[in-house]
C-alpha cells in the first residue's frame, strides 16, 4: 500500500512540476516582435533587391526603393528595375494602398493582401507588424531552429481582416526575433513559408535585411529579398504623396 | 391595267436571255443580303442563348449575400431564377499556375446546364461529384493537367482571407477564351465552402426573363428596387479607381460580373446589377457592324443593278420604238406605254428577288446543316454545333419591296421617254 501511495505522490509531484513550469507571456512576445520590427520614432528607408525564381518563368530581379513612416501607417515603394517596370509605385496612406502605373499615368486601388509586383512577398510584408493585434496563440512548444532556441507558436486570427487565418511562427526565446513563419489557408493548407535569417539593428528596431518567401503551392517558386542602404534619417512629408510618385517618373 | 401586265409579262418572256441576266443579277444581290441578314440574326440569337446558358440568366445581380428581396415584385417578368457562386483565383498544378474563375453551379437546380457545354473529355455525371472541377480545354493545356488529376485552387474568402482547395479534374469542354470567358465549373457547395459562404449561400442571383426584349426595362426596375434596400454599384462604372483584385486579372466580359468597383466606401454587401445586353455589348457591336457592312455591300450591288436596269431599258426603248409607234397609233395612251415598261421592270425585280430568296433558303439549309464542332473558335456562335440562320419575315419582305421598288424606279426614265415618243416619229424611226 505504501508503495502505491509513494508512486502516486511521485506522479502527482511530477504533474504539478510540469504545470508549475509557467508558459511564457505570448502576448508580450507578439508585442515585442511587433515593436522590434516597427519604426515608431523614426522614418525608415532602404533599397531592396528582390530575386524571384519560378521554374516556369525563370529568374526575375527587381530593385525597389522603400520609404516607411510607421507612426502614420504610410509607406512608399518605387520600382527602379527592371526597365519595363521602372516608375511603378505603391503608396499606402489612410487605409488605402495605391498602385501607380507610369504607362497609363493612373493610380488604382490595390490591397495589402496582394502579392507585391508578382513576387511571393505580400504588400503587407512591408508595413509595420501587428501580430499581437491580429492573432492569438493557440499552441506553443519549445524547439531548436538551427543553433537558436525558439518558441514555435501556432497563431489563429482574431478577425477576418488578415490575409492568412492561421500562422505558425518560430521566434527566438532570447530576444523574440522572428526567424520563420508558415502561413496557412482557412482549410489548414500550408501556403507560404517565410524565412528571416539576417537582422540589422537600427535605433530601437530590428529589421530583417534578408528575407526568403517560398510559395508552398506552386513548385519551385520563391523570392529572396535583401535590404541595403538602410537609414532612419527623417524623410520629407512630400515623399508620402501621389505627387511624389508621379514626379519621380518625370 | 390587266392588259398592261399581260403585255409586260409577254415582253419579259419574249426576251428571255436579257430578263434572266437582269433577274439573275437582282437574285444574286437578294441572295447575298438575305443570307447575311439571316446569318447575323441567327448569330445574335445563338450568342445570346450561349451566353445566357453559360452565365445562367439574362439579368445578373451579384454580391456576397444576396437574398430573395428585390425579385418578388417582378414575378410576371421572371421565368427562372438561378443561383451561382463565383470565385477567382489561381489554379495550380505542379509548377504551373493560371488565373481562372470558377463558377459554382447547383446541378440539381440547373438540370440543363451541361447542354450548353461541349465536352471533349469526361462526362457530366463525373463532373457533378463532390470535389470535381471541369475546365476549358485551353486552361487544362496551359496547366498540362489530365482528367482524374488533382489541382489546387488558391482563392480568397468573401472576407478576403486566403484559402486553398483541392479539386479533381473530371471534364474538359471547349471554352470561349476569345471572349475572356475561361471559367471553370464546380459544385456550388464546394465553391461556397472555399469562399466561406454557408452551404446554401450564393454570390450571383441570375434571372431568365419570359421576354428577352424586356431585359433593359426589367433591369432598370430591378435596379431601382434593389437600390432602395441595399447599396448597389452604379450601372455605368467609369473612373480610374479600381477594386483590389480586379486590376489586370479578369479581362473580357466577366469583368462586369466581378466585385463592385470601389469609388466610395461602403459597409456590408454591395450589389451589382448587370444585364446580358451589357455583357454582350462587344458581340452586339460586332454583329451590328457586320450587318452594316453587309447592307452597304447590298446597296452597292443594288446601285450597280439599277444602272444595269436603266441601260437595259434604254436599249429596250430603242429596240421597241416602232412597236411603241404602232401601239400609240392604235390608241394606246402615254400612261399605258409607261405602265408596260414599269410593270416589266417590276416583274423582273420581283421574280429576281423571289429567286434570290429561294436560293438563300437553299443556302441556309445547306450551310445550316454543316457541323462545325471541330472549330473551337466558333463554339460561341453555334447552336448545337451548327451555324444558326434566322430569317426575319419583316426584313425579307422589306428587302423584297425595296428591290422591286428600285427596279421600277430605275426603269422610270426610259419609261417616260417611251411614253413621250410621238407615234409618227416612232413609226418612222429606223435603227
Image: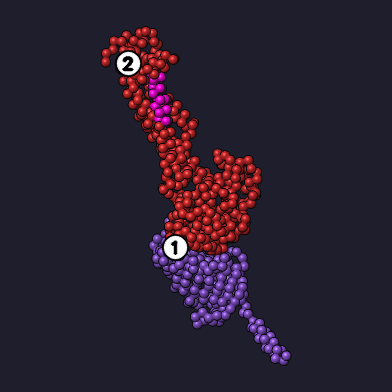
Chain colours: A purple, B red
Residue B290 showing in the rendered view: no
The percent coordinates of residue B303 (x first, y second) are 37, 29
Q: As rendered, which of A33 and B42 lies closer to the eye?
A: B42
Q: As rendered, which of A234 and A117 lies closer to the eye?
A: A117
Label 1 sits on a secondary structure element that is: strand
Chain of the residue on which disc 2 is drawn: B
* Residue under the image location 46 percent in, 31 percent down: B396
Query: Could you tell which of marks 2 and 1 lies nearer the N-terminus?
Result: 1
Residue sitting farthest toward the top: B330
Looking at the image, residue A68 sits to the left or right of residue B76; the answer is left
- Main secondary structure along the magenta-highlighted residues: helix
Q: Residues within 10 Å of mark 1 (few under 14, many from 20)?
A: many
Question: Which image quarter: residue B372?
Answer: top left
On screen, B109 above or below B342? below
The percent coordinates of residue B20 (x first, y second) are 35, 25
* Residue under the image location 44 percent in, 68 percent down: A220
Looking at the image, residue A160 sits to the left or right of residue B349; the answer is right
> For residue B431, which numbered disc appears in the image?
none
Label 2 sits on a secondary structure element that is: loop
The percent coordinates of residue B403 (x first, y second) are 42, 27
- Disc 2: which residue: B320
Looking at the image, residue A243 sits to the left or right of residue B422; the answer is right
Residue A54 showing in the rendered view: yes
Query: On the rendered image, what quadrant is the C terminus of chain A found in?
Result: bottom left
Span colored in magenta: B341-358
Q: Residues within 10 Å of mark 2 (few under 14, many from 20)?
A: some
Q: As rendered, which of A68 and B218 lies closer to the eye?
A: B218
- Disc 1: which residue: B96
Amino acid at each position: 500500500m505504501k508503495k502505491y501511495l509513494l508512486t502516486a505522490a511521485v506522479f502527482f509531484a511530477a504533474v504539478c512540476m510540469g504545470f508549475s513550469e509557467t508558459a511564457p507571456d505570448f502576448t508580450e512576445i507578439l508585442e515585442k516582435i511587433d515593436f522590434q520590427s516597427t519604426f515608431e520614432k523614426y522614418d525608415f528607408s532602404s533599397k531592396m533587391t528582390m530575386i524571384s525564381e519560378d521554374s516556369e518563368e525563370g529568374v526575375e530581379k527587381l530593385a525597389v526603393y522603400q520609404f516607411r513612416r510607421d507612426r502614420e501607417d504610410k509607406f512608399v515603394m518605387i520600382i527602379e528595375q527592371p526597365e519595363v517596370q521602372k516608375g511603378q509605385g505603391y503608396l499606402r496612406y489612410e487605409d488605402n494602398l495605391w498602385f501607380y502605373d507610369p504607362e497609363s499615368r493612373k493610380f488604382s486601388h490595390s490591397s495589402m493582401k496582394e502579392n507585391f509586383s508578382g513576387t511571393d512577398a505580400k504588400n503587407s510584408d512591408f508595413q509595420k507588424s501587428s501580430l499581437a493585434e491580429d492573432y492569438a496563440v493557440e499552441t506553443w512548444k519549445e524547439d531548436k531552429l538551427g543553433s537558436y532556441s525558439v518558441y514555435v507558436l501556432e497563431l489563429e486570427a482574431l478577425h477576418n481582416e488578415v490575409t492568412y487565418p492561421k500562422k505558425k511562427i518560430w521566434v527566438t526565446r532570447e530576444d523574440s526575433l522572428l526567424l520563420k513563419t508558415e502561413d496557412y489557408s482557412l482549410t489548414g493548407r500550408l501556403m507560404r513559408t517565410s524565412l528571416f535569417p539576417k537582422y540589422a539593428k537600427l535605433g530601437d528596431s530590428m529589421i530583417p535585411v534578408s528575407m526568403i518567401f517560398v510559395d508552398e503551392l506552386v513548385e519551385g517558386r520563391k523570392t529572396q529579398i535583401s535590404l541595403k542602404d538602410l537609414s532612419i534619417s527623417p524623410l520629407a512629408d512630400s515623399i508620402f504623396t501621389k505627387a511624389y510618385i508621379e514626379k519621380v517618373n518625370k | 391595267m390587266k392588259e398592261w401586265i399581260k403585255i409586260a409579262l409577254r415582253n419579259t418572256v419574249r426576251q428571255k436571255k436579257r430578263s434572266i441576266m437582269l433577274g439573275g443579277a437582282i437574285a444574286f444581290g437578294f441572295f447575298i443580303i438575305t443570307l447575311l441578314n439571316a446569318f447575323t440574326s441567327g448569330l445574335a440569337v445563338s450568342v445570346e442563348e450561349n451566353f445566357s446558358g453559360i452565365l445562367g440568366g439574362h439579368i445578373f445581380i451579384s454580391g456576397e449575400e444576396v437574398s430573395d428581396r428585390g425579385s418578388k415584385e417582378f414575378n410576371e417578368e421572371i421565368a427562372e431564377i438561378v443561383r451561382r457562386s463565383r470565385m477567382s483565383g489561381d489554379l495550380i498544378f505542379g509548377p504551373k499556375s493560371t488565373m481562372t474563375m470558377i463558377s459554382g453551379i447547383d446541378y440539381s437546380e440547373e438540370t440543363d446546364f451541361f447542354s450548353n457545354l461541349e465536352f471533349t473529355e469526361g462526362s457530366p455525371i463525373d463532373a457533378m461529384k463532390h470535389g470535381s472541377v471541369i475546365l476549358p480545354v485551353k486552361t487544362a493545356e496551359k496547366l498540362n493537367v489530365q482528367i482524374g488529376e488533382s489541382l489546387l485552387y488558391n482563392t480568397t474568402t468573401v472576407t478576403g482571407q486566403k484559402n486553398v482547395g483541392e479539386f479533381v479534374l473530371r471534364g474538359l469542354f471547349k471554352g470561349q477564351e476569345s471572349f475572356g470567358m475561361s471559367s471553370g465549373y464546380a459544385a456550388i457547395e464546394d465553391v461556397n465552402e472555399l469562399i466561406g459562404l454557408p452551404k446554401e449561400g450564393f454570390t450571383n442571383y441570375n434571372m431568365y426573363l419570359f421576354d428577352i426584349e424586356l431585359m433593359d426595362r426589367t433591369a432598370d426596375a430591378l435596379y431601382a428596387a434593389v437600390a432602395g434596400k441595399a447599396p448597389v454599384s452604379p450601372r455605368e462604372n467609369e473612373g480610374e479607381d479600381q477594386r483590389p483584385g480586379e486590376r489586370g486579372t479578369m479581362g473580357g466580359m466577366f469583368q462586369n460580373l466581378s466585385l463592385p468597383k470601389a469609388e466610395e466606401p461602403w459597409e456590408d454587401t454591395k450589389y451589382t446589377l448587370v444585364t446580358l445586353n451589357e455583357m454582350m455589348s462587344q458581340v452586339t457591336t460586332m454583329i451590328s457592324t457586320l450587318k452594316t457592312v453587309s447592307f452597304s455591300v447590298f446597296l452597292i450591288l443594288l446601285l450597280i443593278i439599277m444602272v444595269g436596269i436603266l441601260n437595259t431599258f434604254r436599249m429596250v426603248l430603242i429596240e421597241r420604238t416602232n412597236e411603241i409607234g404602232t401601239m400609240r397609233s392604235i390608241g394606246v395612251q402615254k400612261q399605258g406605254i409607261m405602265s408596260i415598261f414599269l410593270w416589266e421592270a417590276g416583274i423582273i425585280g420581283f421574280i429576281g428577288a423571289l429567286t434570290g430568296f429561294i436560293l438563300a433558303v437553299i443556302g441556309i439549309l445547306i450551310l445550316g446543316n454543316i457541323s462545325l464542332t471541330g472549330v473551337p473558335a466558333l463554339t460561341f456562335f453555334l447552336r448545337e454545333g451548327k451555324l444558326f440562320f434566322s430569317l426575319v419575315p419583316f426584313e425579307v419582305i422589306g428587302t423584297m419591296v425595296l428591290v422591286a421598288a428600285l427596279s421600277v424606279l430605275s426603269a422610270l426614265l426610259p419609261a417616260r421617254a417611251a411614253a413621250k415618243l410621238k407615234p409618227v416619229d416612232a413609226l418612222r424611226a429606223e435603227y
